[in-house]
Amino acid sequence: MNDRMIKKILVPTDFSKLSMVALEYAEILLELQTPKIYLLHVLDKSTMRKEVKGKKRTDKNFAAIEKVAMKQLSTIAGQYFTETHVVTMALRKGDPSREIVKLAQEEKVDLIIISTHGRTGIAHVLMGSVAERVVRYSPIPVLSVKPARMQMKLMEESDIDEQLHLKPAGNK
């Protein structure tokens, strides 16, 4: 058997429309090989705060949030993969980038496919990027996928210089 075969793929999702782009790439790989797919959603602190806002925090609240998240993962698995594909759904709590890399290492994943949200400029600086941190810290290969609206945009050299912070915004 070829050592270069991709046997396990991790696809993290935050359930946004943009994160589904990574699943489309996983589908393409499934046409070529039959890897095991790991679908992961990480409940980070900010998500947990939003979900229980206005309610007293209890284990019951967290259990309800986890139940909804697992149901969403199951729905996604049904939409993107057939019964013949081996799909493992995982739910973690914590820092998303850390938990993605941690699961990938624990399960000896061959490839992580992650969508970027396409934030640039100040939004990128303020929000940071889970995908960027995964690419930076993962010892496992990462396929970072841009949303279609970013793929379709023609970038000029000055746009690239601006995004790489080589020159200030607006100086074309």
Image (cartoon, rainbow, N blue to C red):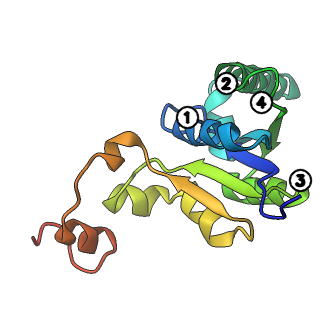
Residue at 85 percent across and 22 percent down: it is 60
**Residue type highlighted by circle 3:** Glu
- Of tags 1 and 4, the one toward the viewer is 1
Q: Position of residue 13 (x, y in %)?
A: 64, 39
Q: Residue at x 60, y 31 (%)?
A: 15
Q: Tell me which label, 1 or 4, sits earlier in the chain.
A: 1
Quarter of the image for residue 137 reads: bottom right
Cβ–Cβ under 8 Å for marks 1 and 2: yes
According to the image, label 1 marks what residue? 20
Is 11 above or below relative to 89?
A: below
Disc 4, SS: loop
The image quarter in which residue 67 lies: top right
Dot 1 and dot 4 residues touching (CB under 8 Å)? no
Left or right: residue 135 versus residue 101 is: left
Instruction: Pick whichever, 165 or 38, lies toward us.
Output: 38
Q: Find residue 89 and report its image quarter.
A: top right
Question: Are dots 4 and 3 in contact, CB under 8 Å?
Answer: no
Q: Earlier in the sequence, mark 1 or mark 2?
A: 1
Could you give the CA–CA distance between mark 4 and mark 3, rounded to whole angstroms? 32 Å
CA separation, marks 4 and 2?
A: 28 Å
The disc, 2 or 3, on the residue closer to the chain's N-terminal end is: 2
**Other-residue count near label 4 (Cα within 10 Å), few / some / many at <14 / 14–19 / ≥20:** few
